[in-house]
């Protein structure tokens, strides 16, 4: 329901429409309507708009080509000597679009023309009349004729093309035309009546080969990225398509390929919505629906764009029912529909949207109005939603769950046969939703549990830095409903574990303590490959750092070349880190609720977390549900919606009044969503008289690990980052080194990601940065031009036992993500640290120095003798004491797994 084809709604109908255009030939002016003038081009990749009033034939810088105008006049034109990516290219395509431009030749002649999209029948007429004699021009038109055959026959037709045709194209260097031919083959394999993914892959490899030559047109780059992203979608990938569609959109925008730009916008929005990145999808949807964007679209593509963008809204409303319906878009899709395919999709989308809002008669009417021909254009994926919509109609329209079950089982079968985990997840969530309506609580809990397993598999397939956390966050509606059902059945422990798992399960494979590098934990082949990649990463990273240090001596031209090379190398290093994470996290132990819960089983410690409540009848969220676990008891209470800090105050006030904090020594808060920004330890508590405030820690929800990790040494590393602009940082480093030395710790001044030995303690003072999608580009600037970034830290998985980070934003979180996303504190924990103390906001360097001095002054030598657990407890207690005495240090937190 969201695939955009380069030819619009169906190739056979687009061809039929194109063939209705008058066949014409420049040698036969009588075949052309005298007014307006119809323009054809021969030997051009496109028409280059030098300015709003000047159009020239686009071929190669500095070369000439012929433009054939309807009057039969041959006009010389040339493309200015500009880079391929600059300027506008007007693309000839099929359909009724007409744009008026002034054509100016090299000799100064000016002609006012209407650029009509030229049909393939016209090209046949040109060849048939024998007016083209130049081999280069004949090859171009032969390629256009071959494109038609590939449209009709798919990738297999590409294989049947004669070698002389492709040879002529290669000899004459018509890469733009060849690229178009391969793009059409890829499109046909991906979107044709008979899908041929293998053939599409072969065509995309050919496009990639052209792209590597670096002499192709912008269209080739666009098609490579656009159809490559479509192939990733067809293969069930969630994150890779976003990157491809984004590159395609940027390429089309830079070269003013308007139709392709809007197509890529719509598809990128869909890919983002599938990942649960709804805010970004909404932004792109608005850009695609801008009237300036729509005015560039041919009529045959508009319904496909409207249907695609409507589907983006439908996906969001599955998770957030209060979002606006796509009624306006669906009306436009229906009115613009020219083919059975676009009409069928518009009717199905309208039925799904109506059923979402409980308008079952309207949904039934849309499905019944669908003709057999329209239904015949629907894919297996579409048919899953036909059945789910029918199930909702039956359940909500009085037929009951028994009537809905037939359609649910059909949908589950279709999803299973299609190997589509996304569809399977949607089936299970819909089934659970209808079981809830039917009062089948136990069955619904079972369906939600099955959906959790499928959702976990999907989340694990998403690269952590591509929005895995946001994908997990997008399914919070189902988690809230599952927890509510468990509570209704008085299963409080199950409800607690449900919300804790939603916050942490997708992180488990990244945690070093859950993926061992020893013989017992990972197969030798996987372990060896990961180790080899890490070594390669370290060597290349060091070479890049060395080159960067010497870059000051380069000339401007040399530096520009180095900058391009360094950027490419940086992207390659990021790719290596992702590959290592992908290899290792698959070997991790499963997430266990008891690993998180165990620390609160004693009466002196407790766990506090929270989760949004289930939606009300109007699709609104009435508030949050707090879970407080102490000993074997789980207390659950609700707080009305409001500002995060106000809700936290009400929750803590309730706990104080209920005596839940009495005689409590420590609380671990596992914050979710908007509460990741709330400093619970700094809220104005009123403990009962004679009771001291408990120590506060913040957890990821992973808990203690059963995996074996290397024992930390007794040494410490005091690491000085780039001191630029941090006048107090050197004083902080000196004070910490002196104090730790007095405690008889061996203190080093350097540390590398790949070091075999992990220190007991690392103290860092320097610049920190927070950035990227939900924080995945965060880093510590350990030296001028050298960073320790979150990706590398997680990939290497060899963090010190305890880290104290005197760096801005080291603990900053993103409230859009259920887990707060990534930051350097989280990265250290996932890399194996037991505890990280770090500020969650920017901090002044003088305040950071003062904090470090006070913290280590409270670290007793006995704790160092006892080991990491004792040091962790001592520093946690020191932090709490410092914060109780001076609120200036409230920004620091103690984080644990």
Image (cartoon, rainbow, N blue to C red):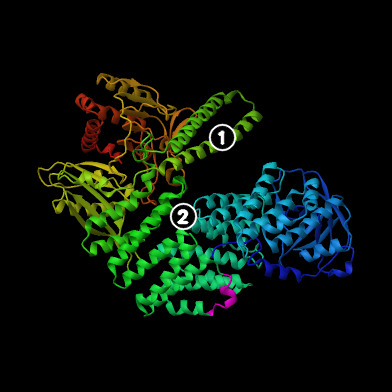
**x then y, percent, for residue 140:** 79, 54
Q: Which mark is residue 41?
A: none
Q: Which residue is mark 1?
A: 569
Query: The N terminus lies in which quarter of the figure?
Result: bottom right
Q: Determine whether the residue tagged by mark 2 lies in a helix, strand or loop.
A: loop
First along the sequence among labels 1 and 2: 2
Query: The C terminus lies in which quarter of the figure?
Result: top left
Q: Which residue is mark 2?
A: 275
**x then y, percent, for residue 254:** 64, 49
Can residue 76 be seen here? The reply is yes
**x then y, percent, for residue 824:** 39, 38
Residue 322 against residue 828 in the figure, above or below:
below
**x then y, percent, for residue 524:** 43, 36
Can residue 38 be seen here? The reply is no
Q: Is residue 41 left or right of residue 646?
A: right
Q: Determine whether the residue tagged by mark 1 lies in a helix, strand or loop.
A: helix
Q: CA distance from mark 1 to mark 2?
A: 28 Å
Q: Which residues are magenta?
A: 369-377
User: Closer to the camera, 432 or 529?
Assistant: 529
Residue 620 against residue 515 in the figure, above or below:
below
The residue under the point 50% across, 29% down is: 785
User: Closer to the camera, 530 or 340?
Assistant: 530
| Badge count | 2
* 376 in the magenta segment: yes
Q: Is residue 215 left or right of residue 530?
A: right
* 544 in the magenta segment: no
Residue 534 against residue 703 in the figure, above or below:
above
Q: Is residue 569 left or right of residue 104?
A: left
Q: Is residue 312 left or right of residue 763?
A: right
Q: Residues within 10 Å of mark 1 (few under 14, many from 20)?
A: some
User: Closer to the camera, 725 or 339?
Assistant: 339
């Amino acid at each position: 329901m969201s695939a955009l084809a380069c030819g619009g709604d169906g190739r056979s109908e687009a061809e039929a429409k194109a063939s209705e255009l008058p066949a014409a030939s420049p040698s036969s002016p009588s075949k052309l309507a005298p007014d307006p003038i119809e323009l054809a081009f021969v030997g051009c990749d496109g028409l280059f708009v030098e300015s709003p009033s000047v159009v020239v034939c686009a071929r190669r810088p500095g070369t000439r080509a012929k433009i054939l105008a309807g009057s039969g006049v041959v006009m010389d034109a040339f493309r200015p000597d500009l880079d391929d990516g600059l300027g506008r290219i007007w693309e000839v395509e099929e359909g009724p679009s007409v744009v008026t431009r002034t054509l100016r030749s090299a000799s100064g002649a000016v002609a006012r023309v209407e650029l009509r999209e030229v049909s393939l029948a016209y090209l046949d007429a040109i060849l048939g009349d024998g007016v083209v004699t130049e081999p280069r021009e004949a090859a171009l038109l032969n390629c256009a004729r071959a494109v038609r055959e590939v449209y009709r026959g798919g990738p297999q037709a590409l294989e049947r093309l004669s070698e002389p045709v492709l040879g002529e194209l290669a000899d004459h260097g018509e890469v733009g035309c060849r690229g178009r031919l391969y793009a059409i083959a890829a499109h046909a394999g991906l979107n044709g009546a008979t899908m041929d993914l293998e053939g599409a892959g072969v065509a995309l490899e050919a496009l990639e080969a052209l792209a590597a030559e670096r002499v192709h047109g912008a269209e080739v780059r666009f098609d490579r990225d656009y159809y490559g992203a479509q192939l990733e979608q067809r293969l069930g990938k969630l994150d890779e398509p976003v990157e491809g569609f984004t590159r395609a959109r940027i390429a089309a925008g830079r070269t003013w390929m308007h139709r392709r730009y809007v197509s890529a916008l719509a598809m990128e929005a869909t890919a983002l919505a599938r990942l649960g990145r709804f805010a970004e999808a909404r932004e792109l949807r608005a850009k695609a629906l801008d009237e300036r964007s729509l005015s560039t679209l041919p009529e045959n593509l508009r319904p496909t764009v409207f249907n695609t963008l409507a589907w983006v809204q439908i996906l969001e409303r599955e998770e957030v029912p209060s979002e606006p319906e796509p009624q306006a878009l669906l009306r436009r899709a229906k009115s613009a529909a020219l083919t059975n395919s676009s009409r069928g999709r518009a009717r199905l989308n309208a039925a799904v949207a109506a059923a979402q809002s409980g308008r079952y008669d309207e949904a039934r009417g849309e499905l019944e109005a669908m003709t057999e021909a329209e239904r015949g254009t629907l894919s297996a994926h579409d048919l899953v939603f036909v059945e789910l919509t029918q199930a909702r109609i039956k359940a909500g329209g009085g037929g009951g769950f028994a009537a809905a079950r037939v359609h649910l089982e059909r949908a589950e079968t279709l999803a299973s046969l299609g190997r589509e985990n996304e569809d399977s997840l949607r089936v299970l969530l819909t089934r659970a939703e209808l079981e809830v309506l039917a009062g089948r609580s136990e069955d619904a809990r079972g369906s939600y549990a099955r959906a959790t397993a499928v959702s976990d598999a999907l989340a694990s397939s998403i690269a952590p830095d591509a929005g895995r956390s946001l994908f997990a966050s997008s399914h919070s509606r189902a988690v809230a409903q599952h927890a509510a059902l468990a509570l209704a059945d008085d299963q409080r422990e199950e409800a607690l574990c449900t919300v804790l798992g939603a916050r942490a399960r997708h992180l488990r494979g990244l945690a070093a303590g859950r993926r061992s590098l020893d013989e017992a934990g990972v197969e030798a082949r996987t372990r060896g490959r990961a180790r080899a990649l890490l070594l390669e990463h370290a060597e290349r990273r060091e070479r890049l750092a060395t080159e960067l240090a010497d870059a000051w001596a380069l000339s401007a031209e040399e530096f520009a070349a180095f900058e391009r090379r360094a950027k490419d190398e940086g992207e390659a290093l990021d790719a290596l880190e992702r590959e290592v994470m992908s290899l290792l996290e698959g070997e991790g132990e499963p997430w266990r609720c008891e690993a998180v819960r165990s620390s609160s089983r004693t009466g002196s410690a407790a766990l506090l977390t929270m989760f949004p409540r289930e939606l009300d009848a109007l699709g609104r969220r009435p508030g949050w549900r707090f879970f407080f676990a102490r000993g074997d008891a789980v207390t659950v209470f609700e707080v009305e919606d409001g500002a995060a800090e106000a809700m936290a105050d009400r929750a803590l006030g309730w706990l104080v009044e209920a005596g839940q904090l009495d005689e409590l020594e420590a609380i671990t808060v596992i914050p979710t969503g908007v509460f990741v920004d709330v400093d619970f330890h700094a809220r104005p508590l009123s403990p009962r008289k004679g009771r001291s405030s408990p120590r506060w820690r913040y957890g990821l929800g992973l808990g203690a690990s059963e995996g074996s990790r290397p024992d930390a040494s007794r040494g410490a590393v005091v690491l000085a980052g780039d001191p630029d602009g941090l006048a107090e940082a050197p004083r902080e480093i000196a004070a910490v080194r002196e104090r730790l030395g007095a405690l008889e710790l061996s203190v080093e001044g350097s540390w590398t990601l790949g070091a075999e030995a992990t220190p007991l303690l690392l103290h860092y003072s320097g610049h920190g940065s927070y950035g990227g999608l939900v924080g995945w580009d965060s880093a510590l600037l350990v030296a001028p031009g050298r960073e320790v970034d979150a990706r590398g830290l997680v990939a290497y998985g060899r963090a010190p036992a305890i880290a104290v980070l005197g760096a801005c934003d080291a603990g900053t979180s993103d409230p859009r993500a259920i887990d707060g996303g990534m930051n350097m504190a989280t990265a250290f924990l996932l890399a194996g640290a037991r505890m990280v103390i770090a500020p969650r906001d920017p901090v002044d360097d003088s305040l950071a120095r003062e904090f470090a001095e006070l913290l280590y002054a409270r670290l007793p030598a006995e704790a160092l003798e006892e080991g990491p657990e004792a040091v962790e407890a001592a520093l946690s207690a020191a932090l709490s004491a410092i914060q109780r005495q001076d609120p200036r240090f409230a920004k620091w937190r103690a984080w644990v797994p």
